[in-house]
Image (cartoon, rainbow, N blue to C red):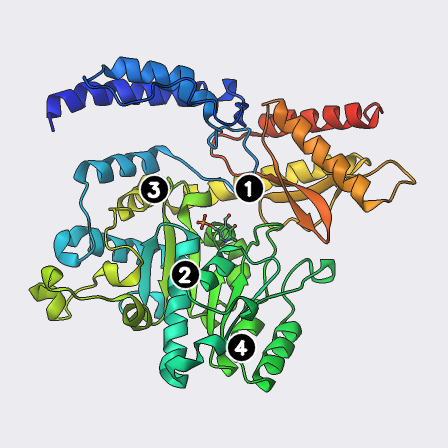
Amino acid sequence: MDSEQLREYGHQMVDFIADYYKNIENFPVLSQVEPGYLRKLLPDAAPNQPESLQNVLDDVQSKILPGVTHWQSPNFYAYYPSNSSVAGFLGEMLSAAINMVGFSWITSPAATELEMIVLDWLGKLLKLPQEFLSPGHGGGVIQGTASEAVLVVLLAARDKTLRRVGKSALGKLVVYGSDQTHSALQKACQIGGIHPENCRLLKTDSSTNYALPPEIVSEAISHDISIGLIPFFLCGTVGTTSSATVDPLYSLGKIAKSNDMWFHVDAAYAGSACICPEYRKYLDGVEEADSFNMNAHKWFLTNFDCSTLWVKDRNALIQSLSTNPEFLKNKASQANLVVDYKDWQIPLGRRFRSLKLWMVLRLYGVENLQHYLRNHIELAKYFEECVGQDSRFEVVAPRLFALVCFRLLPPVGDNEVCRSNKLNQVLLEAVNSTGKLFISHTALSGMYTLRFAVGAPLTERRHIAAAWKVLQDEASTLLGTPLQ
Ligand code: PLP
């Protein structure tokens, strides 16, 4: 490492990145390239001799950026956001600079200790029950993604149950979620050796706004017990992926408890909003949970990846995931004086991810973060009002946070679902191919539904107004009708 070269190249890179952000609105939000475009533009083999940074940056500009979908564009409304911020960015830089591999406390005590402290800070901001904080039997840990979070707690729950009922019962274990639960739960079941038929994704519908009715969970559990199966894991969601609905945590948690099951709460997207007192109600019932997860890398100004997971019983995780090879043994670990996060996650190695979350919390402060979240919710309300004022469209699910689910109605007299779905699919493709904004879709009750998720840090009201105009214009072209 030549620190003077780093200084020179680093300045050049920061200039490049600052210009990227400055000009980000000039790029088509959704990359418009064809599959395989890059192979045609790059050589077949790595260079034998070093090239200049300028050459590489020129290629980034002309060959890589056209193939980038610009998640940080203010006109990005697809999926859920993935925030970048100055503080998050600086934290990433520092983490890259230190570049330690913090699997055990001894490999960089500050990395483990800062992670524990910052997760306690965030846990307190979310008003999580005391049991989730590190002074007790629980604590927080940063995972890469919500998928890893649900996997590790599912493994912990599985093993805890098998210790009770015997290892041979693996094939009888059953997991419950809803048809709105993120597919990460299914993947966790696949990896965790849960029989594919024993992952129950219980049906929801518009009558509960796609939330999981507790009675349906109770019935499914009773039925499974009556045929000799063993329910062991229930996943509730705060802010589902399709429509940001909230499952009834309290009732689900009570059901889980009375059946000796692990209750996991996935608040990957909407958890962030719950640092605002007026949205904290959506976490009511979290006291019944065994684990809780929120992606700070979605809507909390913390660059990807930073998925915060809290558990009440850290030993359950450790019992499933711990290994203790000779080459990792050290005094502090052997004496049980420290947390070794390698035992709370799948990989051994881990980055210093708490730095960026710490910097976000310190450089912005709670009040600014609350303001940031509220502003997006206000912008989403504004978009919802726009949709509501155009009779050709309808909002199809209640908006709780900053996601609006809507669709273009078919022409009067045409109620055929297939045609209506096609109409919305064509509208989505037309809008996205303008490059002026990027929205995504889902299916709700078999209906092709458009999703408009406000959450990019640079989005302002003028961007929403412009996006809505594009949607209206494309709808007019499609329907062959003028604006109403
Ligand atoms: N859970 C919910 C509710 C989500 O919306 C998502 C992604 O959008 C996930 C889990 C998966 O997140 P990750 O990519 O961090 O695994």
Is label 1 in contact with label 4 (beta carbons under 8 Å)?
no
State the residue in front, 330 or 121: 330
Compute the Cα span from label 2 to label 1. Answer: 22 Å
Which residue position is annotated with label 2?
151
Label 1 or label 4, whichever comes before in sequence order: 1
To which residue does mark 3 refer?
Answer: 360
Q: Is residue 43 above or below residue 413?
A: above
| Residue annotated with mark 4 | 254
Image quadrant containing the N terminus:
top left
For this view, does 224 lie left or right of residue 358? Answer: right
Rate crowding at label 2 as few (under 14), some (14 to 19) or many (20 or more) other CA atoms within 10 Å: many
Q: Earlier in the sequence, mark 2 or mark 1?
A: 1
Q: Which residue is mark 1?
A: 79
Report whether the residue tagged 2 is closer than 8 Å to ligand 1. no
Determine the residue located farthest toward the left in the rendered image.
Answer: 331
Nearer to the camera, 152 or 463: 152
Residue 406 horizontal/vertical position (percent): 71, 42
Q: Amino acid at mark 4?
A: Lys
Q: Could you tell me if the residues under marks 2 and 1 are in contact, i.e. CB atoms within 8 Å?
A: no
Dot placed on the residue nearer the N-terminal end, 1 or 3: 1
Q: Is residue 249 left or right of residue 480?
A: left
Kind of residue indicated by mark 3: Val
Q: Residue at x 36, y 70 (%)?
A: 312
Foreground mark, 1 or 4, reads 1
Q: Is residue 483 visible?
A: yes
Find numbered disc 3 in the image and state the secondary structure of the residue it sits on: helix
Q: Secondary structure at mark 2?
A: helix
Q: Quadrant of residue 30?
A: top right
Q: Earlier in the sequence, mark 2 or mark 4?
A: 2
Residue at image location 53% in from the left, 55% down from the top: 183
Q: Give the mark nearer the N terminus: 4 vs 3.
A: 4
Residue drawn at (38%, 84%), measured in percent from left and top?
A: 164
